[in-house]
Every structure is written in structure tokens, then in C-alpha cells.
Image (cartoon, rainbow, N blue to C red):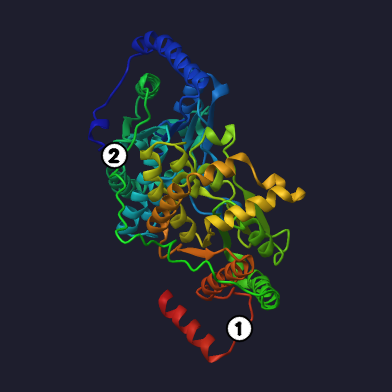
Amino acid sequence: MFQSAEIGHKLSKTAYREAVPTLRAALLAAQIDLFEQHKTPVVVLISGQDGAGKGETINVLYEWMDPRFISTLAFSQPSDEERERPPMWRYWHSLPPKGRVSMFAGSWYSDPIRERIEGAISIKELDARAQQINRFEEMLVNEGALVLKFWFHLTKEGQKQRLTALSSDPRTAWRVTQWNWDRLKTYDQLQDVAGHLLRVTNTAAAPWVVVEGTDDRYRCMTVGQVLLKAMQNKLATKETLHTLTAPMVRVDLDGRNVLSELDLTLTLANKPYKDELAKWQGRLSELVRDARFKNRSLVCAFEGADAAGKGGAIRRIAAALDARQYQVTPVAAPTDEEKAQPYLWRFWHKLPRHGRVAIFDRTWYGRVLVERVEGFCSETDWLRGYSEINDFEHELIEAGVIVVKFWLQISQAEQLKRFKEREQIEFKRFKITQEDWRNREKWNDYQQAICDMVERTSTGEAPWTLVEANDKNYARVKILRTLCEHLASALQKQPKLADAPTVKSAKAKKINQGNSERKK
């Protein structure tokens, strides 16, 4: 992919001076149109070899464009806060809202390239990371973003000359350190790794633009022209680009499904309920204080029919936790800020640090439930939502997050009973709205959407727990018990912290021995 960037591209001073005023005016016009229309976010990745002019090009773009609607984000080694969350968390936090431009100096490509050069990951692991990146970028584009990826290329001799020239000029010598010279020694490795990664991530949704970095004028003009044409094309496009998706086809010939098979007559009397509640709340409290949980975090996702008892179940979980340790996030219609971002953005923002618990009262599954049934998004959007949600949860689990998902199911008759009770009890009236009554009319549509959701997103890593919730006592105990079982199972697979006392039981020795063998 680098051959076309090794032929000595140059632009004369005269041609450059003549072209810049027109380009600047057009860039400003396109940038203002994007901002006023809130049409799309623009994500610009500036990558390439050391000394190829990444910083200079960003500075020129700031000069040519309106700096009020543009930002630059530079990424190096992650901070402590970033290490305690999935690797993509910091990039999600930095995505621009619709109408703005963000330039990334360093991006989600930096770590895979570095790790492969250092030998920390295999070529198969690099390819897996590349596919994850492809899906992430495709999701951004399908959500309306414009993703531009530039790789600034220099030959090995060209990079050496560039570093020499920079270090010999007193005005730029500070930009060249011993680290840059050491990186020159890994030039061939970088070429191999970057060339491979660029090839497998050069997609139709987000292609790479390889730019020769030897001549400053040629490099800046090329980037400016590509950025301008991309923004103009985006402004001229009426519809958001959608990935072709196979239509949903579902047939239940015998009328049975995962919801119809639930036994909603299950109950738990008050006396055993109180005993079981205390038992599992105590167990949950122990588990979140376990030393091994200091290196993990917990995400509890609650979905269910209106009036199914999500809030009551969440309060029973919270009662077992230290208030400083958890955060409950009720999810309603997105705010204007959230509408300006991809739909998963607001959930990435609420992910917990190590040793913390995040409880979501309604979740990212709104895309394939309420948005699907109510027509708040297109069929293509909610169809691709299944795979994007699975990717999201997979990233959480890979980063050590324990994900537990609950669907609370009640019958139509029980729902009607609870609706009427809410209308009669003064302090519960706020829970019932006209929208709740309207949703009952679409009961069958929601049941179909729920079955599809469970079928497509109940994975081995993050299975759904379907809760028979006609009886609140039974539902709350089942939720607490299931949560404790998932948490205990996850912690059992996690070795004790180094400073934790060693347990000398035969079982513990066997586990430690197995962990040692796996490390070898």
C-alpha cells in the first residue's frame, strides 16, 4: 500500500500559494454547513511514521479551519482510570458530536501496532483486533459519522533525513528525541505490521488514504483536499449509509417460545422470602468485598415489561452494597447531547471502574426493543444492533467486566392489575403514564421483539436470565441468587491478589497449580 507514496510527490510554492485561499474558503464553508445542520460528526485519524509531519499537518488544518468546531486528541499510554475500563473506552469518550470535527493523533490503531512490533500479540491476535476495529468503524459510519484515516509515509532513508533536518534546526530540534531515533531502528517491523493492518482495515466504510510525507506542501494540500471532498459529499448525501442486512425471519410453528415456557405461577411466601432475601443480600455483600473483585467490575442490566418490578429488584441489590460502590443509571429517551452521538455512546460513559458496580434500569437493548417496535429507528438500524450489542458486551467481558442481564416477565393480567394499583396509590402515580397504557396495545409486537433479542444476544459470555416476575418475592430472590452465582463463578476463575493470604486447602493448591501451568 506504500508504493504510490514513494515516488517523490512535490508541490511548488507557487502552486501551493495559489491553491490555499480557495481551499481554505471551501473548508470553512463546508465546516460551518456541517455544524449548522448537525449533519454528521467527522473523525480524522492522523497516523504514520515519526517525522512524517503529523503535528505540522494538524496545525495547518487548525489555521485553515474554524478552531471553534474542531478539536485534537492525542493518545499515549492509558491512564490508571483508562486501564480500569475496556481499551476502547477512552476513544468512545473522545468521539465528536454531530457537526464537529475531531482529529486523533494516535488512535485505536496505535496499541495493536505497538504490541505486534514488541511481540506481545500474534498475527492471529492482530487480525482479531483488526476485525474488531472494522466493526467499530462500520458502526460509526452507519450511525452517520464521516471517518477519514490518513497514513503519512516516509521511506527509511526519507525518515532518517527528515529527523536529521528537524534536529539540526534550532526551531524544531526539541521535537526530535532519542526515542525517535530508537524508533528508526524498528522501521522495517513497522512497515510490515502497519502494511498488514492497513490492508485488512482498508474497508469501503472507512478506507485508508496513504500520503507521502516528504514534502510539507504536498502533504497538507492532499489532506485538505481529501477532507474537503469528503465533507462536501457528506453534505450532498441525503440518506445515511447502511450496511446491507438479511431480513429478520422468525417462525414459531407450535406457538411456543422462551417467554411462553416461563412458569408465571411460581411464588415465594413471605417468611421464606425474608430468609432468602437476607441470605443472598449477605452473600452479595461478601462477594463485592472479596479481594479479587478489586480487579473486576460488575454491570447489571435490567429489562422487562412495564410494571414488571425492575425498580424493586434494583433496590434490593443496592441494599446489599456500599453507596460509594455502585451507581444506578435509569435509561429514558436520549437527551440532545446523546442524540448527537452513536446510540451506545451514553452507555460507554457509564461503565464502572474496578471494584465498582453499574446497574442499568433499562439498557442498550432499547435499540432492538422500543426503537424497533415504535419505529424510532430504521429496520436496518435495529437489525445491525444485535451484532453491535454483542460486540459491546464482548469488549466488556474481555476487559474483565462481569455482565449479568435480566429480563423480568409478567402476564398481561398481572400488568393490568399493577397499572390500576399505581393509579390508586398516590406515591406511585408518577410511575404510570399514558405511554404505558399505549404500550399495552403493542404487547404482541414487544413479545416478538423480546424473543428475537434473547435468541440473538443470549451468548455464552453474557446469557439472559429470564425471571418469572408475577410474584415479586420470587423474582427478587431469583435475581439476587443468580447475580451471586454469576459473580462467584467469575471470581473463582480470578486468581487471588498477590498480597492476599494464601489458602492452603487442597482445592486451592490445585487451582493455583492449574493457574501456574496455564501461565507457562
Residue 160 horizontal/vertical position (percent):
36, 37
The label on residue 502 is 1
The label on residue 103 is none
Check disc 2 and report its element: helix, strand or loop.
Answer: loop
Q: What is the residue that sits farthest to the bottom in this orientation?
A: 506
Residue in the picture at 30% in, 57% down: 123
Whether residue 495 is visible: yes
Is 391 situated left or right of 411 in this image? Answer: left
Residue 41 horizontal/vertical position (percent):
47, 30
Q: Is residue 12 above or below residue 324?
A: above
Check disc 1 and report its element: helix, strand or loop.
Answer: loop
- What amino acid is labelled 2 in the image? Leu
Residue in the picture at 41% in, 65% down: 460
Depth order, front residue of 459/288? 459
Q: Are marks 2 and 1 in contact (CB under 8 Å)?
A: no
- Distance, label 2 to label 1, CA atoms, is 55 Å
- What amino acid is labelled 1 in the image? Thr
Residue in the picture at 59% in, 74% down: 498
Whether residue 352 is visible: no
Q: Is residue 291 above or below residue 218?
A: below
Tag count: 2
Q: Would you name the residue on which mark 2 appears?
A: 244
Q: Earlier in the sequence, mark 2 or mark 1?
A: 2
Depth order, front residue of 255/516? 255
Residue 312 lies in what quarter of the image? bottom right
Is 407 situated left or right of 385 in this image? Answer: right
Residue 304 horizontal/vertical position (percent):
54, 55
Is 256 situated left or right of 34 in this image? Answer: left
